[in-house]
Structure formats: structure tokens, C-alpha cells
Image (tube, rainbow, N blue to C red):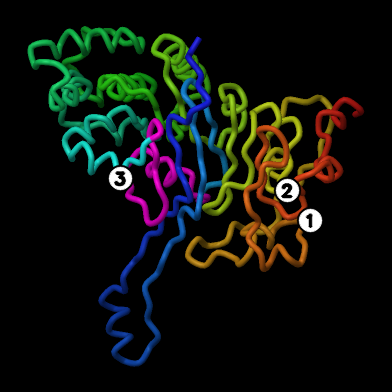
Amino acid sequence: MPTTSSLPLLELRKVSKRFVKKPDAAARLAGLLGAKVADQTVHAVDLVDLEVRRGEVVGLVGESGCGKSTLGRVAAGLHGLTEGERWWQGENTAALKDRLGSAAWRRRMLAIQMIFQDPYASLNPRLRVQQIIGEAPVAHGMIDASNQQALVAELMQKVGLDPQFMRRFPHQFSGGQRARIGIARALAVEPALLICDEAVAALDVSVQAQVINLFMKLRDELDLTYLFISHDLGVVRHISDRVVVMYLGRVVESSSAEDVFEEPLHPYTQGLLEEAPRLEVRRKTYVAIQGEIPSPMNPPRGCHFHPRCPQALPRCAEEVPALRNVTAGRWVACHRVQADESWHAVAPRMAATERAR
């Protein structure tokens, strides 16, 4: 079993990421003619706190457009921070870069690797598999070029691929095989944390199961930690130790997978689980979350979810709810959920209700 630790392996503190689009030529021309023109800012991630401890699997869920993929790229270092801090093994990565220098810092940050959603678009179609998997450890001085073929063969066997195919190109593999190539490429630099961004979403269901089982096998063998980003609640429930729920750039709930799926506290989490398909004999009335997710270029004031929330209070439209620890290991950003026993009256006892039915 993987080693767990109370010290966060990765920690994001009040992290924000905004993308600014400057006016194009037509907009600038309209501005010269008197039209009101301004930069367009996308608030992709807004003051997010996130911890990932060694040895655990953290599921990050939410609707499309909620910012979970952007948060994953920020965590991996692929996107810079607009605000906030990123900590790795108890050290601020910005201070760590100043202390170690750019080259040593990049080598240290190889411990965080990302596996992308599209297993074909993320692979260079002009490179053979041997180069795709073995290029990084050679480039970073982890192995000699003469040892590349042996390393690639070992990694391909580890992820369930025949090493005889290392001279092939990505288009000569199936989708599931390309996903395994992406995993082998990430493993080549001996990471401690894998950030999986919808890593099985593009695969058939049967192949999804095989790849998920591979992730769990590698977790045990290599003592890996995962941040698993997905919209598939069934997959997240199956593999996650802890679940973090995002809505429009903010974390609204964070708790153990069992607590989130058996007794969700935030109204948005409750709505997500109500919409999830289930294998049940009894008839069930489908109730969707009302309205559409607002634009991240113009998010609502106060709680971002309040325009769609059936339990919204007047203060929800004005005051941003803090992510509070309501009980051991349970964090919720909702004005209705108080940091005392009153939250029990608000939370739907889903497990008890299901048993009563």
C-alpha cells in the first residue's frame, strides 16, 4: 500500500488564475469610433486552497467550465499563478526556484507530471514511442542515451504494452494503448504526483476500467499520489480517497469520498449527485440543476452558485462564503452550513433516505 502522510505533498494557497484577452483589431477600431472597449478577463480559478497528501487519491469534480482543468495545470506548473502560492513538500516553489536556480528547480519539479485527456493529441505524431517515452529522462540527465531503450522497454511492460512496438508511431496504436503510452511517458521521470486530467474520458467503458485498474496498480507499486480530475462521478467514487468539488473557479466542498457521496452538504454537490445516473430498480424523478453556469468573464457577486441555488439566502448574493471546516475533515463554502451541529439539519441524509425507500 502507498505511504500516507499528514504533510501535504502539494499545497495551493489562495491561488487564482485569470486569462486576459486584449481587444482585437476590429474592437480597437470600434474604440476609435467611440465604442466602449475593454479587456476581457476570464476568472478561471478564484482564490482556491487545495492540499494533496502523499499516497492519497484526490478526485476533483465539477461541471464543464468550472476551472478544474485549469487548476490542474496550475498545480502541475503548466500555468503561472495570477495570485497565490504553490507549495511542494513544504516549500514555496517560488522561493525554491530562487534558492536552487532554474535548472535544479526544473529537475525538482519533474516530480509533478500530468496525463492529458486526449491520448492522441498529447503525443507527438512525428516521434516514435521510444522517443516519446525516453526523451525526457535523457534530456534531464537522469539516464544516459545508451540506456534509453532498456528504460522504455521496462516502462512499456509496466503499463501493459509490448516493448517490441517501441519503434511504432502513435497512430499505429489504439486509444487505450495511446493512454498507456502517456502514462509511461509520465512515469519515465520518476514522479511522486500524477495529475490526471480526464485521463479516461476519451476511452470506451471497458478500456476505462483497464486503465483505472492500471492506475491503482501503479499507485501500490510506485507509491504514487494522484490528483484525478474528472466529470465522471462513478469513476471518482471508485478510486478517490477524498473529493474536492469546484463550481465556477471556486472550491465549494471538500471531504472524504464516502462523506461526499453519502451525505453531501453543499447544494451544488447535492445537485450533481442527484443528476448522476444510477443502476436502480425503482423509478426516480430526474431534477436538473436549474439554469446555466454563468460566464467566468462575468461571475455573479457573492456566492457564485446563488443564482441557481434553491436554498439561497439574501446574504448569498452579496457575501462570498468562506470554505470552512464544519467538522473533522469536512470543508464547505455555504452560508447555510454553519460551523456547528446545525449543519446536520441542512444536509440531506441521503443514505438514510435511500434505505427508507
Q: Position of residue 109 (x, y in %)?
A: 28, 33
Identify residue type, mark 3.
Ala
Point out the stretch of residues depicted in magenta. Answer: 65-90
User: Is label 3 or label 1 in front?
Assistant: 3
Residue placed farthest to the front in the image?
A: 99
- Residue 318 inside the magenta-drawn segment: no
Helix or strand or loop: what does disc 1 sit on? loop
Residue 267 — which label?
Answer: 2
Q: Residues within 10 Å of mark 2 (few under 14, many from 20)?
A: many
- Residue closest to the eye, 60 or 208: 60
Q: Position of residue 105 (x, y in %)?
A: 23, 35
Q: Tell me residue 341's x, y (percent).
A: 83, 41
Q: Amino acid at mark 1?
A: Gln
- Residue wearing tag 1: 311
- Horizontal side of 331 relative to 235 (left or right) equals right
Circle nearer the viewer, 3 or 2: 3
Q: How far from the left and from the top, in percent, is residue 97?
A: 24, 41
